[in-house]
Image (cartoon, rainbow, N blue to C red):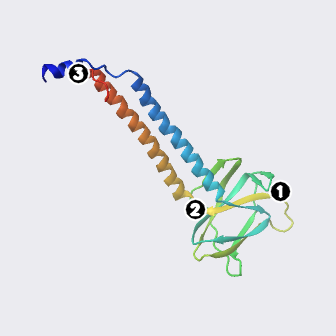
Amino acid sequence: MSALSHAGAAGRKPPGKIWYLAAGLAALAGFVLAGFFGYAKLVDLTRELTQIVVPGEAVLTLEPGHYTIFHEYQSLVDGRLYSGTDVSGLQVRVAPADGGEPLALEQPGASSSYELGGRAGRSVLVFEVTQAGQYRLAAGYPQGEEKSQAVLAVGRETTGRILSLVFSVVGIIFLGVAAAVLIAVMTYRRRRAGVAPK
């Protein structure tokens, strides 16, 4: 390095410690953005669920795919609050609205749950639709058995979508942390070399 280059380098101030704060803010921003993104997507998932007050029935327009039936033990429907965990004995039937054999209902292989926006539920049944159309979901208790009304929520199978959401959130956090590490490392090296960031 020439004497002129040495003089130029010596005339530059090393980066201040404020750059370490910038690194911390970059990491924090990653966590905050991931939180907002994850929350917004979870709200969208719950909004896509169709709520049904039972005992009762509803006609659903369904596309081919796997569906989950949740029991919303904490719910709000048409301004009315529903709360309760006991739906033992509830009989659920899903069949084509124009008649036909009912669909096979099974217990989920892995339980899933949610608690968001004043709503909380857990998966109780799953079923598969192979042909698009209207289906009637009816649920009730055996004759003579009386229990408080409850709320079921029906939506597409969520495991894959939740996994995708988790990976997206982790990706956002990773980018924030990676940016923080990059800023911190560059600041450290340039402080040692006595050269300010350009």
> The residue under label 3 is which amino acid type?
Ala
Q: Residue at x 49, y 36 (%)?
A: 29
Quadrant of residue 140 within the rendered picture:
bottom right
Of tags 1 and 3, which is closer to the observer? 3
- Cα distance in 3D space between marks 2 and 1: 27 Å
Q: Residue at x 45, y 34 (%)?
A: 27
Residue 9's label in the rendered image is 3
Q: Residues within 10 Å of mark 1 (few under 14, many from 20)?
A: few
Q: Residue at x 79, y 56 (%)?
A: 78
Viewer-nearest residue: 195 or 94: 195
Q: Residue at x 47, y 39 (%)?
A: 30
Q: Is residue 140 among what the camera can see?
A: no
Residue identifier under label 2: 157
Q: Quadrant of the N terminus?
A: top left
Image height of 177 relative to 14, above or below = below
Mark 1 or 3, nearer chain start: 3
- Cα distance in 3D space between marks 2 and 3: 61 Å
Q: Is residue 128 among what the camera can see?
A: yes
